[in-house]
Amino acid sequence: GENVEQHPSTLSVQEGDSAVIKCTYSDSASNYFPWYKQELGKRPQLIIDIRSNVGEKKDQRIAVTLNKTAKHFSLHITETQPEDSAVYFCAASRSGYSTLTFGKGTMLLVSP
Amino acid sequence: GAVVSQHPSWVICKSGTSVKIECRSLDFQATTMFWYRQFPKQSLMLMATSNEGSKATYEQGVEKDKFLINHASLTLSTLTVTSAHPEDSSFYICSARRTGAGETQYFGPGTRLLVL
């Protein structure tokens, strides 16, 4: 089955800095890669996703890059703000095989 | 759009009792829903995939007789924890996929279960 590794487990940055979270996956057939943000005690919220037919996707301060050859994808947050503080999870799945395999999560702390 | 609700949001019960958790897609139809379990400071662990009108598919190590899943309509799936024990205490989260609209899963707010 799929295995998703996520690093780092914790990340502390100053407000305004950039933050990068990296994930690797094992199943070369995976082609859908979402990122979720989960604040303490709340539901995971989809913030961005990418499919394997593109290498990069951007939405305002958030971007995701995908390297299919190396089987890794990354989340980039620019100009971080305190409200970006949360746990971020990456995930991977195959189309048609609908379950998501999640990474262990990264706790991001943005200090003012 | 794509709102998923869960009820109850938290429940405390005595050991040996059964607890039912509901997951509803409020503004879309969901042929497939998922049930996850999350321990403090840990990731989401998929327990089972719930399919409308058919039996759920359970992940390895999850007891289907203990965690009963019923997906009776396109907007409702229920998880019943039977004969709950303290080790079943956890945060249970459901998600739903919009029928015919790709892989995106929309999560419910979760149910915190405490078994005394």
Image (tube, rainbow, N blue to C red):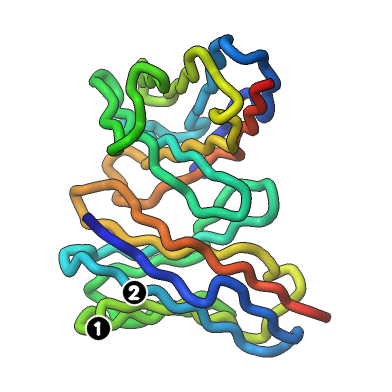
Q: Kindly indicate the quadrant of the structure image that contains residue B89.
A: top right
Residue at x 38%, y 69% (from the top left corner) = A5
B27 or B35: which is nearer to us?
B35
Q: Position of residue B108 (x, y in %)?
A: 55, 39
The local secondary structure at tag 1 comes to loop
Which residue is disc 1 drawn over? Answer: A70
Q: Position of residue B86 (x, y in %)?
A: 60, 26
Report in which chain the residue with disc 2 lies: A
Q: Kindly indicate the quadrant of the structure image that contains residue A33.
A: bottom left
Which residue is disc 2 drawn over? Answer: A24
- Contact? badges 1 and 2 (CB < 8 Å): yes
Q: Is residue A35 left or right of residue A11?
A: left
Residue at x 44%, y 65% (from the top left corner) = A90
A38 or B75: which is nearer to us?
A38
- The 10 Å Cα crowd at callout 2, few under 14, some 14 to 19, many 20 or more, is many
Q: Position of residue A62 (x, y in %)?
A: 54, 77
